[in-house]
Image (spheres, rainbow, N blue to C red):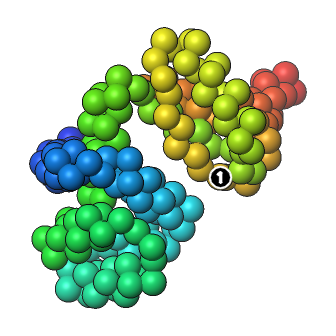
Amino acid sequence: MAAQNSVLTQIARPYASALFDLASSENQLASVETSLSDISRLIGESADFARFLRSPVISADNKASALDALLAKATTNELVGNFLRLVAQNGRLFALDAIIAGFRDLAAKARDETTADVTSAAPLNADQIAALGETLKAKIGKTVTLNQFVDPSLIGGLQVKVGSQMIDSSLKTKLAAMKIAMKEVG
C-alpha cells in the first residue's frame, strides 16, 4: 500500500502544483479550493463515483465523456472543470484524490495553515465547526482548515485526522474496544 501511495504521490504532485500555480496567477485559489473540496466530498460520500474514477476497466475516453456530462450539470469553477477534463484525457482520474490532497497541502502552506479531515455521524453545524476549529488551533498553533465527511456508521462522536495524527472519539470505536475487552474477560 505504501508503494502504491508513493506512485500516486509521484503522479499527483505535478498536477497539483500546476493547478496551484495557475490558480495563484489568476487569483482564484479560494474558488478552486472550494470546488475541489466539493469534488473530494463527492468522492468520499459516493462509493460508486470513487470506484468509477479508479476503475482500470473503464477507458479514459469513457471517463472523460462521463465527466463532461457531470461537469455540464454541476456548478464548478471553470478552471477546475478544464483541469478535470485534462486529467481525464490523460487517464489520471484514478489519482484525483491524491491531486486534490496535494493542491490542498500547497494552498495550506501558502496560508500557513494545516488541514484536518473530520468525519462525523451527522453533518456538523456552524457552531460545532467553529468550536472544533478553535480547539485544534489552540492545540496545533496554526489555523486549521476542516474537510468534513459524514459516516453514519460512526453512530456518534468524531474522527479527526491532522497530518499523521488520528483522534478517534467515535462510539463505533468505543463499542468495538468494549467488545474486545469483554471477550478477554469472558
Left or right of residue 19, residue 51 in this image: right
Q: Which x, y percent locates residue 33?
A: 38, 50
Q: Could you classify mark 1 by the number of other residues whose Cα lies within 10 Å: few (under 14), some (14-19), or many (20 or more)?
A: some
Q: In which quarter of the image is the C terminus?
A: top right
Image coordinates for residue 57, horizontal then vertical, percent: 27, 80
Q: Nearer the viewer, residue 5 or 99?
A: 99
Q: In which quarter of the image is the N terminus?
A: top left
All told, the count of numbered labels is: 1
Q: Horizontal placement of 164 versus 96: left or right?
A: right
- Classify residue 67 as left or right of residue 185: left
| Residue shown at the point (26%, 58%) measured from the top left | 95
Evaluate whether residue 95 shows in this view: yes
- Residue 41 location, x and y as percent? 51, 57
Residue tagged by mark 1? 150
Say what secondary structure mark 1 lies in.
strand
Look at the picture and state if 90 lies above or below 108.
Answer: below
The correct choice, above or below, for 126 with respect to 15 in the image is above
Horizontal and vertical percent position of residue 66: 34, 85
| Residue 122 left/right relative to 70 | right
Front residue of this view, candidates 135 and 55: 135
Query: Relative to 16, is 164 above or below?
Result: above
The one nearer the camera, 125 or 186, is 125
In percent of the image, x 26 and y 64: which residue is there? 79
Query: In percent of the image, x 30 and y 28: which residue is there?
Result: 109
Amino acid of disc 1:
Val
Q: Residue placed at 44% from the left, 53% from the top?
A: 34
Q: Which residue lies furthest to the right in this view?
A: 186
Examine the image and state in which quarter residue 89 appears: bottom left
**Residue 4 appears anywhere in the view:** no
